[in-house]
Amino acid sequence: MSRALLARAAKSLRGRGLTVEIVLRNGDPRSVIVDEAKDWGADLIIVGSRGYSGIKRMLLGSVAQSVVNNAPCSVEVVRKKAARKAERVGRSGSIEAREKAKRKKTQKKKRPR
């Protein structure tokens, strides 16, 4: 699955005229990303974030935060739109918090004026 995803992304980038090298490494992503950046002499790392907070973040850790703290270069953290909405809904960013906000929004629309 990982190789197929990388191949699709590389094809899309090549189609836009970029040179792409596919590198797939095993290990802890926190250290692997930082080590690759050091080996390459990278100027910039772009890393995604799922937007976990609270207990999930504490248990799973934050790859993005670790990369930001340890990288030898600048780091751009990219978030999904859904992750940003979850942060506005509640600190937990949980499905329950999102569903509660959705129900509240629906109730407001149904109120007679």
Image (cartoon, rainbow, N blue to C red):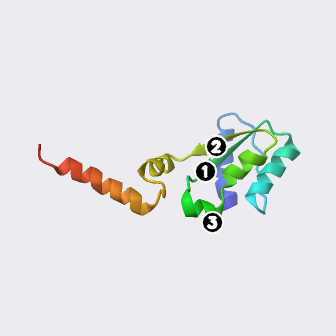
Query: Which mark, residue 32?
Result: none
Q: Which of marks 3 and 2 is in front?
A: 3
User: What residue is at 36 percent from the left and 59 percent from the top?
Assistant: 99
In the image, farthest residue toward the left: 113
Q: What residue type is labelled 1?
A: Ser
Could you tell me residue 14's position as x and y percent? 69, 39
Which badge, 3 or 2, comes first in the chain's sequence?
3
Q: Residue furthest bottom?
A: 59
- Which residue position holds label 2? 77
Give the side of residue 8 with respect to residue 25, left or right. Answer: left
Say whether marks 1 and 2 touch (CB < 8 Å). Answer: yes
Sooner in the amino-acid sequence: mark 1 or mark 2: 1
- The location of residue 62, given as percent across then percent down, is 66, 56
Question: What secondary structure is marked by label 1?
Answer: strand
Of 12 and 28, which appears nearest the observer?
28
Coordinates of residue 13 in the picture (x, y in percent)? 66, 40
| Quarter the C terminus occupies | top left
The residue sitting at 68% across, 50% down in the picture is: 65
* Mark nearer the viewer, 1 or 3: 3
Quarter of the figure with residue 96:
bottom left
How many angstroms separate mark 1 from mark 3 (CA)? 15 Å
Report the amino acid beneath label 2.
Val
Instruction: Name the image quarter holding the N terminus.
Output: bottom right
Q: Distance between the residues labelled 3 and 2?
A: 20 Å
Q: Report whether 31 appears left or right of 95.
A: right
For label 1, the crowd category at 10 Å Cα-Cα, with few meaning under 14, some 14 to 19 and many 20 or more, is some
Q: Which residue is tagged 1?
A: 49
Q: Which of marks 1 and 3 is nearer the N terminus?
A: 1
The amino acid type of the residue labelled 3 equals Leu
Mark 1 and mark 2: span between their CA atoms?
7 Å
Q: Disc 3 designates what residue?
A: 59
Residue shown at the point (25%, 52%) measured from the top left: 106
